[in-house]
Image (cartoon, grey):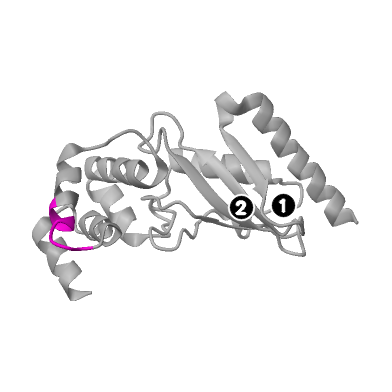
Amino acid sequence: FFKIGFFLADITNIYFLFIFKTSKNQIKVDLVDENFTELRGEIAGPPDTPYEGGRYQLEIKIPETYPFNPPKVRFITKIWHPNISSVTGAICLDILKDQWAAAMTLRTVLLSLQALLAAAEPDDPQDAVVANQYKQNPEMFKQTARLWAHVYAGAPVSSPEYTKKIENLCAMGFDRNAVIVALSSKSWDVETATELLLSN
């Protein structure tokens, strides 16, 4: 009973926040099943970041030991970020691991994820390829992250140059998602991206 009561209070807090602070925080949570064990979260890309204008869907699984253990959270929407796997959506964030406290809520989690999008931690990466690009070529990272935000999260149109490279490789018969991953991970070099696509 304690768990359900705590959890319902948590959900109520989130809906309260969403209804009254939509324009500011842009977060929400919906129930996926009637057992309260799986939720669908959504956060907006923070302003003044490559993710601005995008909407990011999250899978949230509530363990039986909640709130004493953190929820399991991953990005469903593909995203290019050093602390989030570009393949699986797995997240590297301390409060989802050893820094969780029972007093924290799902609101805390969603706001922390928004903050992570605005301030990456490339020295503690979940995706080494993205982290390397973030550190070695910040401008390319921003353009790549913006393109992923456009393609997968509905953000405004990004770099026409990158878009053209994607279309050219897609015209050769390659899968669009595979093309985006290959170009992104190969610093937008068409030749090496093509080699990667042919080797898979």
Mark 2, Cα crowd under 10 Å, few <14 / some 14-19 / many 20+, is some
| Residue occupied by mark 2 | 95
Q: Which residues are magenta?
A: 168-174
Q: Give whichever of 156, 183 is nearer the camera.
A: 156
**Residue at the spot 18% in from the left edge and 53% down from the top edge:** 187
Query: Count of labels shown?
Result: 2
| Residue occupied by mark 1 | 101
Q: Judging from the image, what secondary structure is the residue with disc 2 in?
A: helix
Q: Are marks 1 and 2 in contact (CB under 8 Å)?
A: yes
Q: Judging from the image, what secondary structure is the residue with disc 1 in?
A: loop
Q: Is residue 125 magenta?
A: no
Q: Is residue 169 magenta?
A: yes
**Vertical side of 38 occupied by 152: above or below:** above
Lower position in the chain sequence, tag 1 or tag 2: 2
Q: Give whichever of 143, 130 is nearer the camera.
A: 143
The alpha-carbon separation of the residues under discs 1 and 2 comes to 8 Å
Q: Quadrant of residue 15?
A: top right
Give, as a three-letter code, the residue at label 2. Ile
Q: Give x and y (percent) for residue 49.
A: 38, 34
Q: Give x and y (percent) for residue 124.
A: 43, 56
